[in-house]
Image (spheres, rainbow, N blue to C red):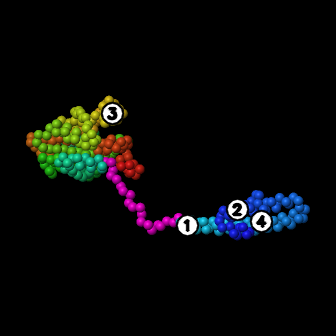
Amino acid sequence: MAAFASAASADELEEARVHALGRKGTLATISKEFGKLTPEERARLGKLLNAVKQELEGEYESKKRRFEQAALADRLSREWLDVTLPAAGIRPGSLHPITRLQEEIEDLFTSLGFAVLDGPEVESEEHNFDALNIPPTHPARDMQDTFWLTNGLLLRTHTSPVQVRGMRKLGPPLRMIAPGRAFRNEEVDASHEHTFYQLEGMMVDRDVSVANLIYFMKTLLSGIFRREVTVRLRPGYFPFVEPGFELDIQCLICGGPGCAVCKFSGWVELLPCGLVHPNVLKLSGIDPEQWGGFAFGLGLTRLAMMRFEIDDIRQMQGGDLRFLKQF
Ligand code: 2NL
């Protein structure tokens, strides 16, 4: 009892417990002598021994609790938290990969004297189709599954109507780009979305040629990919240009011999373009005898996927922070 009372630490207390109550302790040693006693002595001493043992254990337990409480109080005084401290600060956000690419291309074109134009996403049939040399009976209307609104308006299927508005408002000569969202009723899968981003551009001036078109397209592409690119032109049909081209770039992954990205052709189809169709100029009040232009339409979503190596288009508008935080 004296050793328990004078123990100054949990370790000293444990030492005293082993000495008195342990398997080889004082009490255990005394118990071993029981065999030598008569039954009467055994009963009397047994009771006594139990009472002593209970008293010792009681003293030990209460002392032990006191040490535990002191240890806890000590820990609580050290490990505390000031909930009134100011928060760690606002987590910085980042630009969406499409926005980043769009802003880069805007910088590039503004440095070349182009205006960046905006227009409504809900458009008239006239701006979206008729003014682009796509009359009501034209098969190109069927190839785009348009979201029509009940009031006769529609969700623009490309950003071209912004350029129609630009031609009518600014008149020639003009240089402009029109980045923004476009909508088509696509069956959504890894490479098709009903909402996607385009960046169209056009330049209208005197004596604009295919050579000018190629120069601007190569400047655009080497700006995006940050290196020289090899291009080729194939004929392509778009109602609003004549002649129209599909501009391919030599595959940046394999450099020509063929790989999975270019589907073993060495070329990647990237940039539809052409010289603005005379009817399109006329329909926006520009005399095609005096003026000509080139135009192009870039799939921003697809280009961002190539540039940032994103393999599923559904990530782009999905809103998953684990995806977005990578940029
Ligand atoms: C596409 C389409 C192209 C254009 C878009 C254009 C606009 C006007 C006049 C003439 Cl207002 N052309 N835009 C020209 C050629 C191709 O691409 O769906 N691109 C992903």
Tell me if the residue at label 1 has its CB under 8 Å from ligand 1: no
Q: Is 207 or 259 nearer to us in this picture? A: 259
Amino acid carrying label 3: it is Cys
Left or right position of 61 against 32? left
Please state which of the two labelled residues, at mark 4 or mark 3, is closer to the viewer: 4
Q: Is 25 or 280 nearer to us in this picture? A: 25
Q: Where is mark 2, residue-wise?
A: 15
* Dot 2 or dot 1, earlier in sequence: 2
Q: Which mark is residue 197?
A: none
- Quadrant for residue 143, please give it: top left
* Dot 1 or dot 3, earlier in sequence: 1
* Dot 3 or dot 2, earlier in sequence: 2
- At a point 35% along the width and 47% down the height, the residue shown is 316
Amino acid carrying label 4: it is Lys
Q: Where is mark 4, residue-wise?
A: 53
Q: Is residue 315 visible?
A: yes
Give how far apart the Cα atoms at labels 1 and 3 are. 63 Å
Q: Where is mark 3, residue-wise?
A: 254
| Residue farthest toward the left in the current orientation of the protein | 290
Q: Where is mark 1, residue-wise?
A: 76
Give how far apart the Cα atoms at labels 4 and 3 are. 86 Å
Badge 1 vs badge 3, beta-carbon distance below 8 Å: no
Q: Is 287 or 101 nearer to us in this picture? A: 101
Does the magenta run of residues contain 268? no
Residue 127 placed where, x, y %?
A: 20, 48
